[in-house]
Amino acid sequence: MLRIAAFSRLVSRSSLTAGRAMPKTMPQALGLSLTPVRFHGHVHKPKPGEELHVTFILKDGTQRKYEVCKGDSLLDIAQAHNLDMEGACGGSCACSTCHVIVDPEYYDALEEPDDDENDMLDLAYGLTETSRLGCQIKMSKDVDGIRVALPALTRNVSNADFE
Amino acid sequence: MLRIAHKTTFGLRFLTTERKSVSVVGSGPSGFYTVCRLLAKAQIPLDVTLWEKLPVPFGLSRYGVAPDHPEVKNCEDTFSRCAEEFAHGTGKGHSFRFVGNVDVGRDVKLKKLLETQDAVVLSYGCSGDHKLGIPGENTTAGVFTSREIVNWYNGHPEYSGVKDKLSSFDWSKVRRVGIIGNGNVALDITRVLLSNQIKDIWTHTDINPEALKALNEAPVENVKLIARRDFSHSKFTNKEFRELWELERFGIRGTISPEFFKASQFDMKNAERVFKRRVEMVSEYMLPFDQRTKKNYKKHRPPSTIPSRTWEMDYLKTPLTINGNSEGKLESLTLCRNILTQDNKLEQRKSDTLNYDLDLLITSLGYGSSALEEFDALQIGFATNRIANTNGYVLDTNGVIVRGLFAAGWIRRGSSGVIASTMSDAFEVADAVIAELESGSLPKNKDVDLSRINYTTWDDWEKIDKEERSRGQLQGKPRVKFLSTHEMLQFLRK
């Protein structure tokens, strides 16, 4: 099958643009070298031994598991890997386009959503008891191994999707 | 048909070298999301043209979203990245061009587009206003529609700059305001009117400076948000409602009379999540600050002085007449009380009337859309505020699909929903367009003659964008907008 990922690539391209705005001398000053952009988007490469894991269940049911870094948001991770997740407001908790459904096993390990997030979840398609915004979930040890499903636009996703 | 896969500079693989052309009419979120989706997903090389009536893109994102909600406008970044990626295509992959300052239907005929383009998507949204249709509405000074107000404070070329009639309105007399309507636009306007003198909120926004100056003159004391139905029928979202309550930190206080809101009156067990949260919000915010039970309602202690500015939700009333004085200036609004029957029908009590003395009345009844003049001749179906369509495929007056013609966004579904819902709508329609284009009919791909038209390009927009941003930078704002089309074109001619 042909894989078309130009739209997601646009997003990753933006991070390159953003990178250009950083002081050019910074990496050297910190004694770092610039490595080829393998982890693009706004994500970071985890240090060896500190890798965390996340699994995305896509709209067609396929699963993608990634090794990720503490502090990265699910929106950034999804976009860095060209998954079909929009962030219309740029990850500022002002829309509901990065809606994900969290595996109930992990839901309680997350901090409770605040008012701003709940106000946006009000507007999400196919809202479930364990719905969250991808931009508001930051990876941490507490949620290592977390599994989330991307809701299809035209059908309701239920917890059965995790079985 | 021979299908050859070849790789393009964008890394896309196409099934064919035969190019197809798509025109999208209107560059607001629905139009632009349609374009982005087409360019991301189509497996045949496309020449996409995005038509826009104004010289500049983004429609309601630029001119409808409130200036203190810049994060909602972040979708423009996605649109720009998409445009930049494809505006300078190599001829093998997709190409994109923006054609601004061109009114499809007048400057370029829709008929022409249908003849030359393989697919046309209408996404021109809603440029009109719903009206009350009561005496005094069109003749009384001091009565405005929400579109006039919103487009004015957002610097829309048709409502600001040389066409500005709102800046010359005498705002220094505006103490009592009535807003008819209960949607997010009504709440946005309430927030703008009540907080206009709070520099923290507005200094660093791209609000039309002329509008801000005029609004600053207004000693607004009270805004009534008037609705025909009751609290449970309010259309606004919890985010906008919360923002209004949170103005209490500036001494701006909201209220709902017990006549219209008693938490005990609602069937909370069977209520939906959104409504439950709304009831909790009101119950908590109506309590004195120290008596509130949840900490998220105690974020900012209001000043101890008596609130000098208030807003109130006012329900179950229908406006009957707008009354002016001998000079034609607004004096009051006459309304009647309504009741809701058991089966949710609205009954007006025409004899049970009351009068509100008002200095400003804004009707915020939703945006209306209109048919293009050509629809009649082309036999395109149009009814109750939207183009006749099934899943985005436009229907003719007999209910038959018009090949190659689609509709997306508010012109397809009516004027409601946030950008997220418009986005998924646009994606659905774009996918339908792609399916149609890939189904194999022969491409038309003829040019539309623009030689006699003074249009703007994406490069032109980038120049305007850069200029607006650098003007804004000097003042600590995201941008300072050009306020008229003339000014934009003048700038580009330099």
Image (cartoon, grey):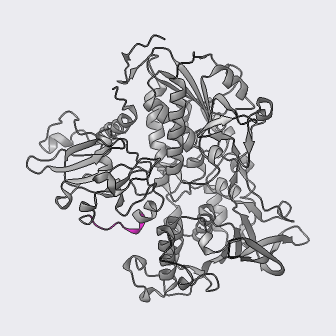
**Extent of the magenta region:** A110-116
Tell which of B266 and A160 is nearer to you: A160
**Is the residue A131 above or below the residue B459 in the image?**
below
Residue B476 showing in the rendered view: no
| Percent coordinates x, y for residue B318 in the rendering | 76, 72
Q: Residue furthest left?
A: A49
| Percent coordinates x, y for residue A13 in the rendering | 34, 35
Screen quadrant of the N terminus of chain A: top left
**Is the residue B444 above or below the residue A77 in the image?**
above
Magenta stretch mostly in which secondary structure? loop
Q: Which residue lies furthest to the top in this view?
A: B2
Tell which of B97 and B491 is nearer to you: B97
Residue B164 showing in the rendered view: yes
State left or right for residue B73 relative to residue A113: right
Is A56 covered by the magenta stretch?
no
Q: In which quarter of the image is residue B111?
A: top right
Tell which of B165 and B148 is nearer to you: B148
Q: How many marks?
A: 0
Q: In which quarter of the image is residue B82?
A: top left
**Is the residue B376 above or below the residue B137 in the image?**
above
| Percent coordinates x, y for residue A143 in the rendering | 21, 59
Q: Which residue lies furthest to the right in this view?
A: B326
Q: Which residue is drawn at 79% across and 74% down?
A: B348
State left or right for residue A123 relative to residue B350: left
State left or right for residue A143 relative to residue B6: left
| Percent coordinates x, y for residue B344 in the rendering | 68, 71
State left or right for residue B93 relative to residue B366: left
Q: In which quarter of the image is residue B140?
A: bottom right
Q: Which residue is drawn at 47% across and 35% down?
A: B37
